[in-house]
Amino acid sequence: MRRSLSIALLTLCVFSMLFAKGTGGTPMTATFQPSTGAIGVYSDNQGPYLNGVGGVKSYIGSGGKDYDLVTYSTGRNLTITFDPNSPQVWNGNAKLLQSSIYQVDFYGVNFYGPFSTMAPGTTAQVHGVLQFHYLKNTYQLDYQTLEVVRDATSGAYHFSSIPGPWSPVPSNSNAMLSLVRKGGNVNYGTVVLPIQFDIQ
């Protein structure tokens, strides 16, 4: 009886954690710049990514310290365009296209605390990981030092790999490109790939 109760409680806890991860805490709308062929991460030119529309998940997690954007199986993508003059990592090593659209899962953790506690006009550091599917494989771009700025007027959060006026740390557009594997990721090297978007 005691064992059955423990198993039931464990199952309930695991289910609760998965449910919280899947639903998030605060729905947000993410806006990326339209793709123009420039190097970086851009939208699929179909407008903002609204939480719950077409299955898109865009939310600040229930703990308030992470932001998630998931477009897997939704028909929505992000455009990733690598530097055509530096193909040794994205083409020579990873065998990716120079520019293509991908279903993605972005996860960004705020090192300084919950997003809701950021005062207007302040900046924090975010560790962002952008995973994407290509030919049945999952790749990821690991950004160690993104910045997020809380807009003093609108309250929106501006994520960027490009240093802003209030950066507490040197943000940059360097990302480690790797292939995600259960036994450990296969690292291909660093790419310079700017990423900027807003959530509100």
Image: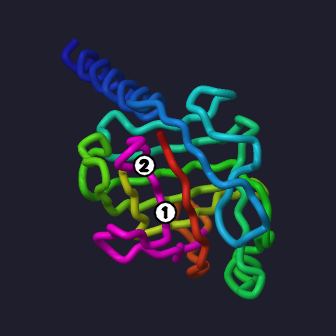
Please name the amino acid that badge 2 sits on. Tyr
Q: In this view, does 74 lie to the left or right of 166?
A: right
In the rendered image, residue 177 lying in the magenta stretch gets the answer: yes
Q: Secondary structure under badge 2? A: strand
For the question of whether residue 117 can be seen, the reply is: yes
Residue at position x 28%, y 70% from top? 168
Residue at position x 29%, y 58% from top? 111
Which residue lies under the disc numbered 2?
157
Choose between 87 and 12: the one closer to the eye.
Answer: 87
What residue span does the magenta drawing correspond to?
151-178
Which residue lies under the disc numbered 1?
160
Q: Secondary structure under badge 1? A: strand
Q: Residues within 10 Å of mark 2 (few under 14, many from 20)?
A: many
Which quarter of the figure has residue 97? bottom right
Please name the amino acid that badge 1 sits on. Ser
For the question of whether residue 133 can be seen, the reply is: no
Is 181 drawn above or below residue 150 in the view shown? Answer: below
Residue at position x 62%, y 66% from top? 179
